[in-house]
Amino acid sequence: MTEWILFVQLFVGLLLIPGEDASCAIELTPPRVVVKYGDPVSVKCTTSAEEFDGLGWEASEGGTGLKEERYVMLTVQSVAEWDNNPMCFITSGTNQCSTRLGLVIYTFPENISISSSIESSEEMRENEEYILTCSILNIAPVQNLTVRWYQGNQIIYSENLTNSTKKPTNQTSIFRFTPTRQDDRTTIRTLHGLQVKCEAELNLGPEGPQPPPLMTSDPFTLSVHYKPRINTTKLPELVPVISGYKEELVCEADGNPAPTVAWNYTATAFLGSNGMLTVNEEGTYICIANNSLAIVKHEIKVILTEDYLPLLAGFVALTVVAISIIFIFIYSIYYKNTKMRRYNLKNPKLSIHNGNVAHNGWDIQLPVTKLS
Ligand SMILES: *[C@@H]1O[C@H](CO)[C@@H](O)[C@H](O)[C@H]1NC(C)=O
Ligand SMILES: *[C@@H]1O[C@H](CO)[C@@H](O)[C@H](O)[C@H]1NC(C)=O
Ligand SMILES: *[C@@H]1O[C@H](CO)[C@@H](O)[C@H](O)[C@H]1NC(C)=O
Ligand SMILES: *[C@@H]1O[C@H](CO)[C@@H](O)[C@H](O)[C@H]1NC(C)=O
Ligand SMILES: *[C@@H]1O[C@H](CO)[C@@H](O)[C@H](O)[C@H]1NC(C)=O
Ligand SMILES: *[C@@H]1O[C@H](CO)[C@@H](O)[C@H](O)[C@H]1NC(C)=O
Ligand SMILES: *[C@@H]1O[C@H](CO)[C@@H](O)[C@H](O)[C@H]1NC(C)=O
Ligand SMILES: *[C@@H]1O[C@H](CO)[C@@H](O)[C@H](O)[C@H]1NC(C)=O
């Protein structure tokens, strides 16, 4: 029974404690304010209550005493307090209630910059993880800050920072980056290197500055080092060379730093100034691509194959000669026959006898048989 009474007393006590109350006959215009640190603020607190003793603002900056007015103004010429939490109070006898102003004080970062976990970007190697840090100096409030990382124009990472502090702080966004050799070429095609940027956007909603303020770091250029890789599409392992002919071997290697390309061979070959090797002997030729990270080798076997072209040409020539002889032979017979026929056609008797001859000029056999 005593517990029950205690509970009721506690409940009544809670009701009597002055606090924020939505049913307070107070109206704030505007109810939410987003202001830049150093800028002025002006908020009106009005009551619709018929009877009250006093109305006033309680604030660490711009507070007023209780006044017997229909409205009171919270006025700050230049916001200088980060932890200001203004509330408008109304008192009536022993009753008091209040409404809190939604006040957001912001400041834009002084500076935003990228740093890397390694001393010099020269050290960065493909397929190894590096930590890039975006430092945002002097930002408030943090909870509405979005940090985006860009590689060229592409977003590679983004995060929303969460920190409930209202005061300006230095914030960092960490991006774990594992470069690949492709990355090295993404932004600058002719030079080796890639550029990353980080960007901080402070989005404070419709009451905040529009468009949301944005600050971008200077581009941070990275150089990704990688082992030489010999282009084997241009250089198969087995190269057949027709004996008596030459073949050009092109060894191209991709790497950063740019590799030096050399050939190792025992056969005699001609090495051009551009690294192109002209070979006409069977043997093993090794292309060696070398940079500060690795030495890469690619072995090529050159084999000689017989040249069937002269043989083929001879065969063709022989065939042509044979056909020519046959043709000449046939023609000579035909020519002889035509002469004969021309002579025979003068004989009308034969013409009547063999009607075929007149329109079958091509048949060389027919007149021969008829004549015999
Ligand atoms: C601020 O940014 C500039 C480049 O925008 C940079 O040179 C300078 O070091 C930065 N200052 C600090 C304190 O980080
Ligand atoms: C950050 O917050 C915005 C909205 O406030 C949301 O659209 C976005 O997806 C968030 N980004 C991340 C990385 O959480
Ligand atoms: C907010 O940021 C400050 C400064 O960076 C730091 O000291 C504090 O621990 C952070 N608070 C939370 C909750 O992360
Ligand atoms: C933020 O960093 C700057 C430069 O490093 C420093 O001068 C300043 O005191 C830092 N601010 C806070 C709140 O830690
Ligand atoms: C800003 O942060 C606060 C606290 O996390 C959140 O309530 C509010 O919706 C955020 N505003 C925007 C526009 O994201
Ligand atoms: C290798 O050479 C071929 C032919 O020129 C080219 O198409 C290909 O892109 C090259 N590959 C690399 C990895 O450079
Ligand atoms: C060249 O080849 C010979 C024989 O295979 C070998 O002894 C030598 O070490 C090679 N040189 C290089 C630079 O690889
Ligand atoms: C690798 O290249 C360097 C020049 O870049 C050269 O001095 C060195 O002898 C080469 N090493 C081999 C093993 O070919």
Image (cartoon, rainbow, N blue to C red):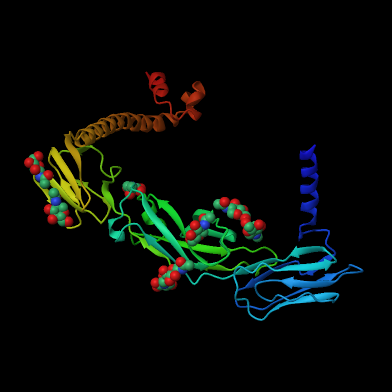
Which quadrant contains ligand 1?
A: bottom left
Residue 218, position in %: x, y? 43, 68
Q: Quadrant of residue 96?
A: bottom right
Residue 64 in sight from this viewpoint:
yes
Q: Residue at 40% across / 64% down in the picture?
A: 220
Residue in view at x 17 percent, y 48 percent: 278
For the N terminus, the image quarter is: top right
Residue 44, given in percent of the width and then of the height, sits at: 78, 74
Q: Which residue of the protein is positioned furthest toward the bottom in this rendering?
A: 77
Q: Quadrant of residue 47?
A: bottom right
Return the x and y of residue 41 as percentages of the image width and height: 69, 76
In the image, 259 versus 135, the foreground residue is: 135
357 shown above or below 84 = above
- Residue 129 drawn at (x, y percent): 36, 49
Q: Nearer the viewer, residue 67 or 285?
A: 67
Q: Is residue 265 visible?
A: no
Q: From the viewer's side, name the closer residue of 165 and 210.
A: 165
